[in-house]
Amino acid sequence: MNRGILWRVILAGFAVFVGLIYLIPSLPIYNALPDWAKKILPDKKIHLGLDLRGGIHLVLDVDVKKAVETHLDRMIEELRHEMRKHKIRYLKMERVGLEGIDIKLMREKDADVLSSIIKRNYPELEITHKEKLISLRLKPEEKHRIMNMAVEQALETIRNRVDQFGVSEPDIRKQQNNTILVQLPGIKDPARAIKLIGKTALLEFKLVDEEHSVEEALKGKIPPGDEILYQIKKDPRTGREIKIPFLLKKRTLLTGEYITDARVQIDPRTNEPYVFITFDSRGARIFARITGENIKKRLAIILDNKVYSAPVIQDKITGGRAQITGAFTMQEAHDLAIVLRAGALPAPVKVIEERTVGPSLGRDSIEKGIKAALVGGAFVVVFMAIYYNVAGIIADFALLLNILFIMSGLAMFGATLTLPGIAGIILTIGMAVDANVLIFERIREELRTGKGPIAAIDTGYGRAFITILDANLTTLIAALILFQFGTGPIRGFAVTMSIGIVANMFTAIFVTRIIFDYLYAVKGLKKVLI
């Protein structure tokens, strides 16, 4: 065999071999293979998208304004601590919407001291002061940063929760206007997943106000700096929910941002699950100070504005550990541990779009997609064989290789096959023979001028190549732009189109040329059957 043809045959054979190796894990035969064979094969396969496998599709809106409010409220607490440390007394300190903080001092001489503290520790604030009134305003770029960070943190938190929930192949990404797209294929309990993803999980520790009457507060006489929150318990006999009111100090002593671990444990006395939490070093110090300063007082543990428990502090707790009890079921305790361990959402999220796709609909889509591909492919194969004779059969062989390379390419990149992706494959079947049609028509033209088989093939491939390259390159650019800026279904279409175009260039030009060269340069056939 000619050396030039030999290396091309080896290259094409190697490409087919690699394609089969990557495709096998996605085929039913993979499950029947022995363990040693599974270890050799790559750990990648084609994933089925939400529209084929079933599951839930959510679009979540992140309340970025709440993130700015929380940031300013936390800043107020830090400023209170700094002012106590420097003995700066004030009459009023309050947040002004999303703009900043206003402070009214008792002594005008403290204004310069406070201004220097703020300039040193809070460069993101713009300061103006007139006599005893200090106005602090968030810089516009800082407000924008907080909002963007809230979306990014929410994205990461949701991803962590989904990973711990055990969903395989989730699609979670940021979209425009502070929204997040979440697609969870194969979910069997959509309601639980939605509840877990959207749970704010704001854990707070606040002191119970035992100096004032909760009954009087319920009548509307709430002391300044206090609030009423409820503990919800279920009556074990009737199953009816009972709301128990608590009068609490509004000031949050500690939040869940310092949690490093949260796990479910069983109380040996009651045989009920509870959530055991561990703080980081800073959180442990704060928790030790809180418990040391408030011995014999009740400390309420609050999650998303619901009181879970309010135990009496018996002694200073220095280990940085606490537990949340609340008559949980095992699943409730497990889900609570997940959201605490994965982190609290930096801002509330709201489900603005929800769709559930049943697996039966997915199976129906796959069956119809495969049927469409088979019917379309059969028509193309028969037409090429009849119209172009032996050359058409060569093009059909290239088409089969093209489909192999598309499927193995999807597996190699760990891509997700969607219903629009199947449409992309069907479209690629038509495009795959389009290049060969151009080549064959060029060869026919050359044969009509009286050229021999080898010369006609050389000229046909040479003249058609630029046209084919130009057409495929422009289509590939369009597919890549769709992939970059499109959403889920469009990206699925773009993926299969992009892989199909690259595979088409290889099979339609490189592989078919090898076969023609072998038949006419090596075997010496005298007539081109085209």
Image (spheres, rainbow, N blue to C red):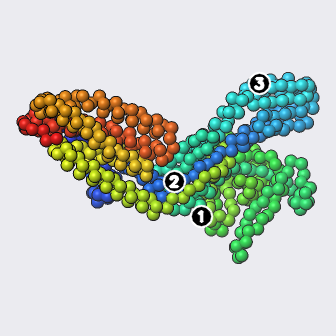
Q: Quadrant of residue 434?
A: top left
Q: Quadrant for the N terminus, please.
A: top left
Residue 184 got which mark?
2
- Percent position of residue 231, x then y: 76, 61
Estimate how packed mark 1 is, as few (under 14), some (14 to 19) or many (20 or more) residues with alpha carbons within 10 Å. some
How packed is label 3: few (under 14 Cα within 10 Å), some, or many (20 or more)? few
Is 493 displayed left or right of 187 in the figure? left
2 or 1: tag closer to the N-terminus:
2
422 and 165: which one is in front?
A: 422
> Could you tell me which residue is drawn at 30 percent across and 33 percent down?
468
Kind of residue indicated by mark 2 = Leu
Quadrant location, the C terminus:
top left
x 12%, y 33%: residue: 453
First of labels 3, 2 by sequence position: 3
Q: Which residue is mark 1?
A: 330
Say if mark 2 contacts mark 1, CB within 8 Å: no
